[in-house]
Amino acid sequence: MHLPTAVNRLATRALIAPLLAPTLPVALRRRGLDLVGASLPLPRGTRRDLGTLGGVPTAVVAPPGPLAPHRVLYLHGGGYLVGSSASHRPLLAGLAHATGSAVLAPHYRLAPEHPFPAALDDAYAAWAALRAAGIPARHIAVAGDSAGGGLTMSLLLRLRATGEDLPGSIGLISPWLDLSCTADALTRNVASDAMLDPSWLPDAVTDYAGPHTDVPELLPLDADLAGLPPLHVVAGADEILVDDADTLVERARAAGTPVTYERAPGMWHAFPTLAGLLAEADASLRTLGLALRADCLR
């Protein structure tokens, strides 16, 4: 049941944006986002379960019917402070239906209770568990939105640094990649982004990264981007983090890495989280899911 884009924009600004801002205690923000996610519709036949990957509690979301042999490891967004598989329930379901396989979303540890590298260690543990289960790296896609997009790139850089096989495909939705918080879009798009306010990002960086902001795993825009798996990037042209996506796409293409990029006009930060309500969200997830599937089954 799609609602008009203007209605979705208004609801995002009124209901979701306040739950991301630090004006509320972090526990209340987490609970509120989970309740919003639980209230949104899912595609018919969606299957949901909870298990573990490498000791990390992990939601498993799948479409009806037999599953394709690949898997998607999904790292949710939320500024490294909030978010879960519950808050991202519609997105996970939409992506599972689009890829035709299971999407696994680890409940990685959150800051400020668990600063870097806890989230990355949990993502790596989940990846290692999939590999230990016999799934070839080329049959695993890793994807994430916002901070989860940054975490996806951190995981990719760690795997390359340790000489491990890389995923078959990478999906990034509105990735937060520049923790210096100096991009021009942070001010240029402050009025047009319905979800994200740049004023609280520096505090989130402090809570998550602390003194580690110069660690290579946290600097994907400064990394050598050659030889990476295909990157599929989605961002809203109206969002405050669009410069992060633009820069990554430009540098990855210059390095010879295959890239697709949907820079969606009129869209705000992480708009695919409104899958099921926003037509543009569903269309973007279908395109992204098909691209991840094609790479992993090639």
Image (tube, rainbow, N blue to C red):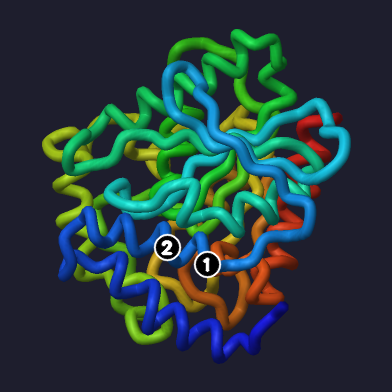
Quadrant for the C terminus in the image: top right
Q: Is residue 48 visible?
A: yes
Going by the image, does 176 lie left or right of 6? Answer: left
Choose between 223 and 85: the one closer to the eye. 85
The residue sitting at 60% across, 31% down in the picture is 228
- Mark 2: secondary structure: helix
Residue receiving disc 2: 35
Query: Given the image, on which type of amino acid does mark 2 rest?
Result: Leu
Q: Is residue 279 above or below residue 27?
A: below
The residue sitting at 60% across, 18% down in the picture is 130
Going by the image, does 106 lie left or right of 33? Answer: right
Query: Given the image, on which type of amino acid does mark 1 rest?
Result: Ser
Q: Is residue 208 above or below residue 284?
A: above
- Mark 1: secondary structure: helix
Badge 1 crowding class, 10 Å Cα cut-off, few under 14, some 14 to 19, many 20 or more, is: few
Q: Is residue 129 above or below residue 25?
A: above
Choose between 66 and 275: the one closer to the eye. 66
Q: Which mark is residue 39?
A: 1
Return the x and y of residue 75 as percentages of the image width and height.
49, 41
Choose between 21 and 225: the one closer to the eye. 21
Return the x and y of residue 85 as percentages of the image width and height.
49, 46
The residue sitting at 35% across, 70% down in the picture is 196
The residue sitting at 72% across, 78% down in the picture is 1
Q: Is residue 225 visible?
A: no
Q: Which mark is residue 156?
A: none
Return the x and y of residue 158 as percentages of the image width and height.
43, 22
Going by the image, does 230 lie left or right of 180? Answer: right
Q: Do the residues under discs 2 and 1 have CB atoms within 8 angstroms?
A: yes
Quadrant of residue 21 in the image?
bottom left
CA–CA distance in space, label 2 to label 1:
6 Å
Choose between 287 and 105: the one closer to the eye. 105
Return the x and y of residue 133 as percentages of the image width and height.
65, 11
